[in-house]
Image (cartoon, grey):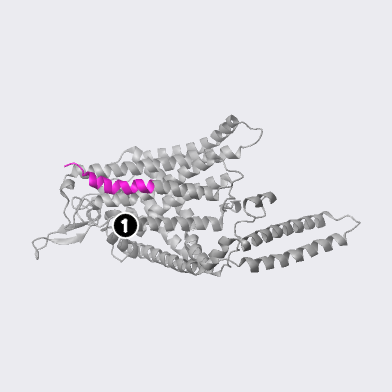
Amino acid sequence: MAIPSSVLAAGWIPFVVIIVLVLLFSTIYIKYFMSKRDSTISSTVSAIVALSVILLTTALIPVDVFLVSYMKDSKGHFKDWANDSETRQSIENSVAYGYYTLYGLVTFCLFILLPFMYFFYEEKDEDTSNKSRCCSALKYTVVFVIIVGVLLLIGAFVPTKNAPNPNATDYQKIEALFKDLTTNDGEDALSFVISIISLLGMCALITYTAYGMSALPMGLIKGRKGAKTEKMTVQAERSSAQARIQSLKDKYSGRSMSSRRRNNLSDMEESERLMERKENHLAANERSILQRCLVVLRPFEVVFGIFFFLITLLIFVSLLLTNIDKAIHSLGYKFGYALPHRTLPNPVDMVLVFCQKVFPLDYIMFSLLVVYLVFCSMSGVRNIGIWFFWLKMYKIRPRRTRPQGILMLCMILMFVMSAINIIIYELTPQYSSFGSQRYTVQSNSTSDGKLEICSTDAHNSSCVISRMALLLTRFFYKMWFFGAAYYWTTWVFLGIMLIGFLVAFIKKRKSAIDGEVDEDDFDDSDDEMIQP
């Protein structure tokens, strides 16, 4: 029987809507942070495309879950159109091709598009032609092409574990994952590259998202300093600085200064100019009608901060319970810590499985969860900045971020989102694997049998596992190192979340003009921010 058009429409139309929303969000976000002075069409479009592609990889997950869940009815039986295994396989293949296409684009953006655009802009000069810039950018991009080429070759030809012995006890627990273990070299190569990207993303997730999940709610709860009070403080500091500068000039009036004194005077004058700019911005902020409205809405900001903190706490508890469950009931590191079925209660997972029964409530809840994790990651990047070891490269500020900083931001977010896809699987093991599927177990007490929640304990003909869970768990078995690494880095992520909460709790309130004034800005760039 052919797949009903209503099934395809219900599964893919929300995804099309999400595509439009993702493109709109990416455009607004990039334009919001991009510097008006230095922005170029090429870097802006590249950043929007890269950010949209990685967000769509996550948006495909609820479509994947919906399609496998919709194959069965409330009694645990396959619907008429899904009784044929070839029909089910056709749907599964279409989703798998979607994952391969999107992750192929992710690899292209990370190793070719973003590096090329970054170096293309770095070569910008009045005396340099576009042809010369392209040649220089290609020269550096070749290094990234070689890196991804080597990774693809390693993934295609490195020896991996074969399917376990069908008579083994462990095989019976995960039989559903290996009904189609045979893969081609192309799939293994792409899976290896994406696993490397996700592993690097876990490092970025630990650095930025873990702190952002505390900094975002605590920042809303604490609020910002009052513009009037802060302006008075800056005025006092500026008057004191002016007095010290004048005193030093009077002391050396008519005679030359030593080089050390001249440097001190220069630093003091630069600091005084920075205070002047802060004072101007604070004065404009104090007069702003928008800021006065935000003061009135301050109670709502606190309420949202408390609500976001509770979400962070819920995510923390759910991840902690999943990791404890894996520590006790998983198949061990040789199987990538695969969890046959959920044993401990997981609040986030339970809510999504329940919402999955009412279409498209789970899609909405899942999207809100992902959006929250994305905003936490962005909050972490804004608070910490972009560093190369001990050197701070770029600050992410509204309408003041250089194109190179935007491209680096997108690269970091692509790594982070790749890791978030893994974290979502850790956070919602039942939902991400089987959705709300159930199957019938024959029982002596009842003629109709007993309904059970689908898990890998079920026979592979009774339940259909999502493509995401199949690809991840199967690859974790073939290369157990990645599954073990994700498991242990999740523990590190939880630990950093606790440390980040303590830092965010102790940290002082932000300035009323946070991100608007910096010592690296041009003096005339204030015209972009201060409105008369």
**Where is residue 112 drawn, in percent x and y?**
48, 38
Instruction: Give the quarter of the figure containing the N terminus.
Output: top left
Tell which of 56 and 298 is nearer to you: 298
Q: Which residue is mark 1?
A: 362
Q: Main secondary structure of the magenta part?
A: helix
Q: Is residue 320 visible?
A: yes
Residue 18 part of the magenta-drawn span: yes
At label 1, which amino acid type do we have?
A: Asp
Q: Is residue 236 left or right of residue 141?
A: right
Q: Is residue 142 left or right of residue 470?
A: right
**Where is residue 106 drawn, in percent x and y?**
43, 43
**Where is residue 45 drawn, in percent x and y?**
50, 41
Q: How many marks?
A: 1
Q: Is residue 163 visible?
A: no
Identify the image quadrant of residue 118.
top right
Q: Residue at x 74, y 56 (%)?
A: 270
Magenta region: which residues? Answer: 1-19
Identify the image quadrant of residue 453.
bottom left
